[in-house]
């Protein structure tokens, strides 16, 4: 073992810790678990509320019949929403390399699944007479995929502090509805690290 408590593998490369658990804050706010199956490979799992200042295009079924008034009305294939709120579970598969002292660089990516539960957001609908009015939708599933780029510093206490940027793709979906958007995040993670014991 090294004086700082870290363990060297056969390639003389530092393994930061066995696993860590704590919180993540920023675009995603919730719980964070990170595990190192091997020296340079980590799996990070998070569950939390995500807020993304994003915009995207919504798509609805083209026509539906209004039984009350007896005509078709169209759900137009455009419209913009902003700031989606989601409760989601994220998994990132990470390659992490040692820089200097307790500092590590990380790169990777992974999927996310969740539920979009913002009260409402607008889209635009046309009826048979070409009248336009805003309408609202509630509750959708969410799926996405992202890259992750960041830095992690592992203190001797042992505490792990991580900052990362996650550009990605998001999809909100429900029956007859999809919305595509740029799903990005900027996060700070604070976790207690469980180190190897020898």
Image (spheres, rainbow, N blue to C red):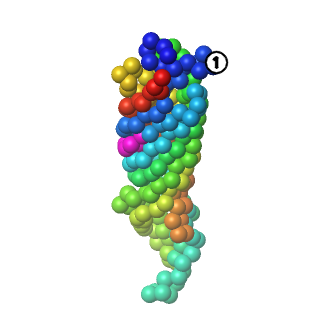
Horizontal side of 169 relative to 49 (left or right) equals right
Give the image location of residue 88, x and y in percent: 45, 51
Towards the viewer: 139 or 9: 9
Towards the viewer: 175 or 160: 160
The magenta stretch spans residue 62: no
Residue of label 1: 11
Q: Report the magenta residues as a range.
A: 26-32
Towards the viewer: 27 or 68: 27
- Is residue 28 visible in this depiction of the protein? yes
Identify the residue shown where x is 49% and y is 31%. 18
Identify the residue shown where x is 44% and y is 87%. 68
- Is residue 53 visible in this depiction of the protein? no
Q: Residue furthest top?
A: 3
Horizontal side of 28 relative to 166 (left or right) equals left
The magenta stretch spans residue 28: yes
Give the image location of residue 93, x and y in percent: 57, 38
Identify the residue shown where x is 39% and y is 43%. 31
**Secondary element type, mark 1:** loop
In the rendered image, the vertical position of residue 125 relative to residue 22, given as above or below: below
């Amino acid at each position: 073992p090294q004086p700082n408590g870290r363990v060297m593998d056969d390639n003389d490369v530092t393994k930061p810790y066995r696993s860590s658990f704590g919180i993540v804050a920023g675009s995603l706010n919730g719980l964070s678990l990170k595990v190192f199956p091997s020296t340079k490979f980590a799996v990070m799992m998070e569950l939390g509320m995500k807020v993304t200042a994003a915009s995207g295009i919504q798509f609805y079924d083209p026509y539906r019949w209004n039984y009350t008034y007896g005509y078709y009305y169209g759900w137009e294939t455009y419209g913009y929403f902003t700031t989606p709120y989601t409760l989601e579970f994220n998994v990132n598969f990470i390659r992490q390399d040692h820089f200097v002292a307790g500092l590590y660089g990380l790169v990777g990516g992974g999927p996310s699944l969740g539920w979009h539960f913002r009260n409402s957001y607008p889209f635009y609908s046309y009826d048979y007479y070409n009248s336009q009015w805003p309408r609202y939708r509630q509750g959708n599933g969410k799926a996405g995929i992202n890259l992750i780029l960041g830095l992690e510093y592992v203190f001797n206490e042992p505490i792990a502090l991580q900052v990362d940027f996650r550009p990605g793709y998001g999809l909100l979906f429900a029956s007859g509805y999809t919305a595509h958007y740029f799903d990005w995040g900027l996060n700070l993670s604070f976790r207690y690290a469980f180190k190897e014991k020898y």
